[in-house]
Image (cartoon, coloured by chain):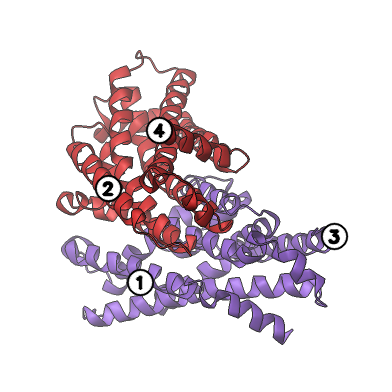
Chain colours: A purple, B red
């Protein structure tokens, strides 16, 4: 098992994925800060908490577009080497358990997405300190909500991971990931949100500020159940898969 | 010229069994369907807003649609540009392709053209789907052909700069994920860039935001800067590709 983990990490070494998952949220926070400074009076004129405003400005486009897009990229990358060079055949002819390989790849991909969220939190904190934001520090917004967004995104990660492993063409998981991300803004406002996992991160991230998105803890319960079901399906189909 | 046509034909042949064609067909359908549902549920409410007073139903449809389409199209074009180049990296075929007696510039131009043609098809299909959506919704006015023609024309020019930049990145970065991530971050920030017209002129990702034919939006940004940057990036890409080292 340790060998599989080290091999998987080795494959990612030159993929620049760590740069991607770290720099992309930094860019979104930078954009949020510039926007906040530009319209400072408008956003804080009625005594609003500046940290909260920094969070909102940085999060809106991050959670609606970039975060699901990055999940698609990370999940696609996880199976890239095996899919592009007929690597599955060689990999699975080795004395390794299919289930172990499948789960380790998924865990590593999920950790990369977690790095992305942590980078987002750290960038927001640094940005706040650099521009000298004062006032109460809202742990709920700056730390709890991004972590909750990560948990809410687990079904998306599971679905795109299953697709990435199944499809040798990277455009399929990418296209589906992106194609389903944009309608989420519309679906989140309807009663059908529960059947659309791409709305969960939006609700988790923006729930408190935008009442329309607030759906309570149901998001997290649904998220955990759905991701477990999808992952179980993925493992079972991968076990039966003919890799020739 | 014959060589260019053959290369272009080869590019489409490579895409024959890929997911690109379904993406090209389904993306405009998805965008139009979302706008159809939006107006089906909220037409009366939207028409009653002060902001929309005096607008025709077709204009309202375009305004509502633009918010999704201005993100959806660039994201899919980013994927297409990346995929067209990734195919060569994936099968290690740059070496073989460029060892043949074909001009490197034409190889690059054929790839650029393939992305542009696919984008054009998406833009045209999107306009047709919107007209159908409006007809099904039963708009009282006749179809505003000039509005749709202007919207499509602005998009052709605006998307040129994004295609130029993404092709340049995809051809030079052997890791498709980097080009994709840059494209996705750019598109996600496009609305932010578009808030400043001065800044938006120089950011290809923001040009699509300026394609909505509306008196409140300066379409000149999409028209002039989209085309100019598109040609500059195409030229830079062809020059860079000529000197590209293939191992």
Quarter of image, res B243: bottom left
Q: Mark 3, mark 1: which one is toward the viewer?
A: 3
C-alpha gap between disc 4 and disc 3: 42 Å
Tell me if residue B224 can be seen.
Answer: yes
Dot 1 and dot 4 residues touching (CB under 8 Å): no
Depth check: B92 or B112 in front?
A: B92
Pointer 2 or 4: first along the chain: 4
Residue farthest toward the bottom in the current orientation of the protein: A2
In this rendering, the answer to whether B232 lies above or below B45 is below
Query: Label 2 lies in what chain?
Result: B
Query: Label 1 lies in what chain?
Result: A
Query: Label 3 lies in what chain?
Result: A
Dot 3 and dot 1 residues touching (CB under 8 Å): no
Residue farthest toward the right in the current orientation of the protein: A240
Disc 3 crowd rating (10 Å Cα; few below 14, some 14-19, many 20+) is: few
Residue A175 in the image, given as x and y percentages of width and height: 54, 49
Residue B120 in the image, given as x and y percentages of width and height: 40, 33
Residue, disc 1: A26
Residue drawn at 25 percent across, 54 percent down:
B193
Q: Which mark is residue B235?
A: 2
C-alpha gap between disc 1 and disc 2: 31 Å
Quarter of image, res B134: top left
User: Could you say whether the residue bearing mark 1 is in a helix, strand or loop?
Assistant: helix
Query: Label 4 lies in what chain?
Result: B
Residue, disc 4: B120
Residue A129 in the image, given as x and y percentages of width and height: 26, 82
């Amino acid at each position: 098992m340790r060998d599989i983990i080290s091999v998987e990490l080795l494959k990612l070494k030159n993929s620049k994925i760590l740069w991607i998952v770290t720099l992309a949220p930094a860019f979104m926070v930078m954009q949020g800060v510039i926007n906040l400074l530009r319209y400072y009076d408008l956003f804080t004129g009625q005594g609003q908490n500046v940290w909260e405003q920094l969070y909102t400005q940085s999060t809106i486009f991050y959670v609606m577009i970039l975060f699901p897009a990055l999940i698609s990229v990370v999940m696609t990358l996880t199976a890239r080497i095996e899919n592009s060079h007929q690597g599955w055949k060689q990999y699975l002819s080795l004395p390794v358990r299919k289930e172990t390989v499948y789960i380790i790849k998924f865990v590593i991909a999920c950790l990369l997405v977690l790095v992305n969220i942590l980078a987002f939190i750290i960038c927001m904190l640094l940005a706040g300190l650099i521009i000298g934001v004062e006032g109460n520090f809202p742990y709920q917004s700056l730390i709890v909500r991004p972590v909750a967004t990560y948990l809410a995104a687990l079904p998306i990660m599971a679905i795109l991971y299953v697709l990435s492993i199944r499809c040798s063409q990277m455009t399929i998981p990418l296209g589906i990931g992106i194609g389903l991300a944009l309608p989420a803004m519309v679906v989140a406002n309807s009663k059908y949100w529960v059947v659309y996992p791409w709305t969960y991160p939006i609700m988790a991230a923006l729930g408190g500020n935008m009442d329309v998105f607030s759906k309570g803890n149901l998001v997290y319960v649904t998220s955990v159940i759905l991701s477990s079901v999808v992952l179980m399906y993925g493992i079972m189909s991968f076990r039966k898969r003919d890799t020739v | 010229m014959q060589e260019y046509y053959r290369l272009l034909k080869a590019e489409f042949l490579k895409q024959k069994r890929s997911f690109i064609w379904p993406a090209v067909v389904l993306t405009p359908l998805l965008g139009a369907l979302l706008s159809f549902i939006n107006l089906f549920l909220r037409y009366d409410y939207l028409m009653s807003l002060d902001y929309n007073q005096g607008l025709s139903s077709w204009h309202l449809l375009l305004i509502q649609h633009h918010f999704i389409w201005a993100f959806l199209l660039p994201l899919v074009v980013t994927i297409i540009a990346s995929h067209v180049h990734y195919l060569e990296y994936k099968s290690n075929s740059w070496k073989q392709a460029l060892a043949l007696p074909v001009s490197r510039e034409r190889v690059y131009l054929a790839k650029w053209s393939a992305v542009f043609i696919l984008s054009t098809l998406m833009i045209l299909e999107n306009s047709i789907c919107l007209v159908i959506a409006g007809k099904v919704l039963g708009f009282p006015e006749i179809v505003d052909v000039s509005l749709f023609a202007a919207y499509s024309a602005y998009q052709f020019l605006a998307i040129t700069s994004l295609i130029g930049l993404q092709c340049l990145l995809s051809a030079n970065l052997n890791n498709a994920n980097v080009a994709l991530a840059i494209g996705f971050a750019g598109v996600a920030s496009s609305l932010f860039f578009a808030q400043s017209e001065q800044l938006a002129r120089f950011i290809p990702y923001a040009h699509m935001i300026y394609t909505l034919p509306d008196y409140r939006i300066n379409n000149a940004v999409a028209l002039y800067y989209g085309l100019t940057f598109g040609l500059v990036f195409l030229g830079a890409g062809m020059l860079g590709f000529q000197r590209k080292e293939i191992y």
